Amino acid sequence: MSTQEQVGCIFCGRSALKTRIKLEALATNYSIDWNVLQVRACLAGPGAGKKGKNASTGWPLIESACKSIVELAADPAYADLVEAIKNRLILITKAYIQAGIISKEELE
């Protein structure tokens, strides 16, 4: 029997192979301007019944429609999403503090 190590996302639970995670990006790659809400175009592609009929395929990002957490928080239409993300972040942070992985001093 073979095995593989996968890391579950602490936010959503989806898994990725441990070998595919870029640890340096996890530690440094974040900005308050990061697009939390990503809007993508739904183009034809394999499995969509239109293979070869469209030069562009996949899910390209529509940068102008994406929103950062600051932009989401300013828009009442996204209040539930912002609150859910905040609550999840607090739960994760408390768990890491309880486990001794994060100290309260590190958060200041």
Image: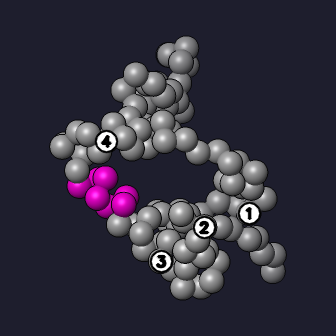
Q: Residue furthest right?
A: 2
C-beta proximity under 8 Å, tags 3 and 1: no
Q: Residue at x 55, y 79 (%)?
A: 97
**N-terminal label among 1 and 2:** 1
Say which amino acid is labelled 4. Leu
**CA distance for labels 4 and 3:** 24 Å
**N-terminal label among 3 and 1:** 1
Residue 72, which numbered label? 4
Residue 65 horizontal/vertical position (percent): 36, 26
Residue 35 horizontal/vertical position (percent): 46, 38
Please count the marks in the image. Answer: 4
Q: Nearer the viewer, mark 1 or mark 2?
A: 2
Whether residue 57 sits left or right of residue 25 in the image: it is: left
How packed mark 1 is, by other alpha carbons closer than 10 Å (few <14, some 14-19, many 20 or more), is: few
Residue 94, which numbered label? 3
* Residue topped by disc 2: 106
Mark 4 residue element: helix
Whether residue 9 sits left or right of residue 19 in the image: it is: left
Residue 62, which numbered label? none
Q: Nearer the viewer, mark 3 or mark 1?
A: 3
Judge whether residue 83 is colored magenta: yes
Q: Nearer the viewer, mark 1 or mark 4?
A: 4
Point out the stretch of residues depicted in magenta.
80-86
C-beta proximity under 8 Å, tags 2 and 4: no
Q: Residue at x 54, y 65 (%)?
A: 107
Say which amino acid is labelled 2. Glu
